[in-house]
Amino acid sequence: MDIAFTEEERAFRQDVRQLLRDNMPPELRRKLAEGRKLSKDEKAAGVRVLYKKGVPTWPKEYGGAGWTPVQYYIFTEEVRAFPGWTQFGYGESLVGPVIYTFGNEAQKKYYLPRIANAEDWWCQGFSEPGAGSDLASLRTRAVRDGNHYIVNGQKTWTTWAQYADWIFCLVRTNPEAKKQQGISFLLVDVKTPGVTVRPIELISGGHEVNEIFFDNVRVPIENLVGEENKGWDYAKFLLANERFSDAGVTSSKESIGRIKKLAARSCAGGEPIIDQGSFREKIAALEVQLKALEMTQLRVLANASRQQKSAQDPASSILKLKGAEIEQAIAELLMDVAGPYTLPYLSEDQLEGNEPPIGPDWAATIAPGYFYSRAASIYSGSREIQKNIIAKAILGL
Amino acid sequence: MNFDLSEEQQLLKNSVERLLADSYGFEKRRTYQTDAKGYSDAMWARYAEIGLLALPFSDHHGGFDGGAVETMIAMEAFGKSLILEPYLATVVLAGGLLRLGGSEAQKADLIPGIAEGRLKLAFAYAEPQSRYDLFDVETQAKKDGGEWILNGTKCLVLHGDTADKIVVSARNSGDTRERNGIGLFIVDADAPGLSRRGYPTQDGLRAAEIILENVRIKNVDVIGDPEGAFPIITRVADEAVAALCAEAVGCFETMQQITLDYLKAREQFGKKIGSFQVLQHRAVDMFVELEQSRSMAMYAAMMAGEDDAIERERAISAAKVQIGRSAKAIGHESVQLHGGIGMTMEYSIGHYFKHVTMLDMLFGDADHHLKRLAGLGGLSNGQVN
Ligand SMILES: Cc1cc2nc3c(=O)[nH]c(=O)nc-3n(C[C@H](O)[C@H](O)[C@H](O)COP(=O)(O)OP(=O)(O)OC[C@H]3O[C@@H](n4cnc5c(N)ncnc54)[C@H](O)[C@@H]3O)c2cc1C
Ligand SMILES: Cc1cc2nc3c(=O)[nH]c(=O)nc-3n(C[C@H](O)[C@H](O)[C@H](O)COP(=O)(O)OP(=O)(O)OC[C@H]3O[C@@H](n4cnc5c(N)ncnc54)[C@H](O)[C@@H]3O)c2cc1C
């Protein structure tokens, strides 16, 4: 056992730093440092820099960087610290691995390079109004009609659908079968006639999620991934990737750094908040939890074989659960620091505009961030569902 | 010991609850919110009609001689419906300052206007550096013959954008964080030199930043001792905390109810989600928080009029700690138990979550009050016999 990174790993870190310094547009870096919103084009530009050596989490043969999990971890650390973290939909993280694992040659050839070049923005069409935790009860129908499927139904909570070029959907192709056995995995061009995207406003004020309606949408049969009625298997693979992938350790570390800086600048009771014993203890306690999670993450990564994520170390199952908890605790600590100055509400447009802020300029996004953080224990499998899975699959209850 | 409401208090409770049940549903509230003022003047008039705006004032000035318990009853009902109107700002805060510190002439001049719904007030206590310390005042008041000249910046003035008059705390002697040397000044909202920038708050209410540049005030518009107003300020702040605790309890009650209704209606896996034991336990935890908070809001109401400042502060801080902690617990759980729908503006629960979050921040969050209480040696004197 050795806590230090190897010499090669340290050299890799230097390479990543160099890559970011040489290629990341300064304007983008500045915006990220200020916590501003990026446009779709800016995100594409950012992601192209991050994908310069290949898509970070993919194997080499499909246009990936072919890095080890530890290398990828170092990469995220550096990118977060730069800061240069950008994401272009769910192509890399969710649908890409499904396509290269279960898709046919034509699909791999067409879709994967377009993801690697940040040409297609993908969104995830799983949840429906009646099918959240009980995803398998989904009702959006796809009926075969010659060389097409005719899709009718509704998806909801679709993150970033307003930017999306494509949506990957779970659709019901056999309503007679047991619910998990009648589902297929279908790729739909969002511009197809009959697809309507409607925004949902979140309590954090932003436009992030949407409802999507499908009204007699004609989807070519070559957009089916794998076999008809086997979609649930691919969905489980995807959900396991989603759950086991990111505990957000590097972004949480960055946030704790931010809390310390802000707490040094803000006073309560006439002294800097950072000098108050009770506050320091709160931060230290959170750092202990985060260090434990980081070590767990590294332990998992060091053992992992990227190809078999679902057969990973059982400890990997706690990453999302604990990661979300820490993310939420961070949002609470930020509220503690900003205190009453979180009260004014600025719309997204005002935040991006030139109007002078009300109160400290950094405080305007703190309360929205706190409200949004509550979603971390709801999306990609609620906290309760995660625990149900761990109890059953890992503890054997 | 008696926790029952008197017959009159019960009537008050019934009438305010009936009014809000009839005219303050979630959709109606949404409409009121779209008014440029951010609330409904028509509802304000209804509050005046049933006597809510006169509640805490003496009957000499057209009031009802109500105490903290009457205020608690009104605030709890307001919390249940998440009302938008400037009751706290006008009646509890500025009204409280007048009631406890105002001269007979000031009371006779202003209180009937409040009670009849003609006059709205705000209290400008916070400043960019002051955070929760009400004595941390940089705004300057300088005596100039029979007048005062005010200069400074006040922030987070609740409903300061639509108030007709604003009571401003300002210093005319001492250092920034000294308790002595602070006065209270009644300023017309359209006084020359006063500018204000109104904005919506995170929970959909309104507030303002107020800048004072050589604003001239007449001597008759000073409340009480121009150098010794701090005891009145703390007293009113303590009353306000008691009122906020009651408002929060009203919110909690509705949050609990909405969540229970959802648990009994929403189905996943072919069952009501309320049949899952883990969610039942969470609902029980919420219920425990609600009842503990209710008890502490009553405690705060009964102690808000306590003359021994130390005893009063202890009780008020203890209540605010409970309320702040419960706001988090109930807020988090009620959203969680709803899943995605709980995160949306279309649905009501998130609005309550945001409001109780902001209630925690008013007049000191739970951590602030825990520190104050600990500084006072806790709730008991800790003497060993
Ligand atoms: C911000 C955000 C972004 C999202 N992005 C996407 C996206 O891009 N694509 C997409 O497809 N979906 C997305 N989702 C949807 C998300 O996956 C669902 O919200 C989630 O699966 C929960 O479903 P639900 O909202 O229907 O809640 P429900 O399933 O109705 O859950 C309500 C409550 O019941 C609990 N519960 C349910 N079943 C059980 C059980 N068996 N035992 C114990 N408790 C249970 C839940 O934990 C929750 O507390 C997003 C959601 C949010 C909030
Ligand atoms: C100090 C002590 C004093 C006691 N005094 C008395 C007494 O005076 N008179 C008397 O009659 N009994 C008494 N008891 C017994 C007590 O009532 C039982 O221990 C209790 O009912 C639990 O039953 P059990 O021990 O068989 O555990 P089990 O019922 O086997 O429970 C084991 C665990 O499973 C949990 N569990 C069980 N059912 C459920 C469920 N449906 N949902 C969720 N979790 C569940 C329990 O909470 C517990 O954690 C006493 C016990 C203790 C420890």
Image (cartoon, rainbow, N blue to C red):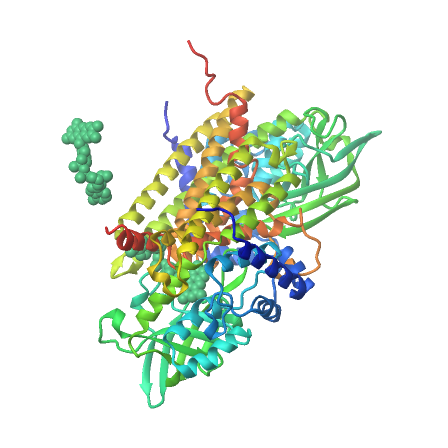
Left or right: residue A391 versus residue A82 is left
**Residue extending furthest front?**
A7
Give how far across and how far down residue A34 sits, in percent.
65, 55
Give how far across and how far down residue A177 sits, in percent.
22, 74
Picture layout, residue A344 above or below residue A142: above
- Can I make out residue A10 in this image? yes
Identity of the residue drawn at 40% across and 41% down: B14
**Residue extending furthest right?**
B145
**Residue extending furthest top?**
B385
Give how far across and how far down residue A212 sits, in percent.
44, 72
Left or right: residue A384 versus residue B305 is left
Picture layout, residue A107 above or below residue A98: below
Determine which quarter of the picture holds residue A77: bottom right
- Can I make out residue B273 in this image? no
Q: Between residue B371 and residue B253, name the one nearer to us.
A: B371
Q: Quadrant of the N terminus of chain B?
A: top left
Q: Quadrant of the C terminus of chain B?
A: top left
Left or right: residue B159 versus residue B318 is right
**Residue extending furthest bottom?**
A146
Identity of the residue drawn at 29% across and 67% down: A137
Give the number of callouts.
0
Quarter of the image where ligand 1 sits: bottom left
Give how far across and how far down residue A49 sits, in percent.
60, 68
Picture layout, residue A148 above or below residue B161: below
Identity of the residue drawn at 47% across and 46% down: A2
Q: Between residue B284 and residue B206, name the one nearer to us.
A: B284
Q: Between residue A74 and residue B86, name the one nearer to us.
A: A74
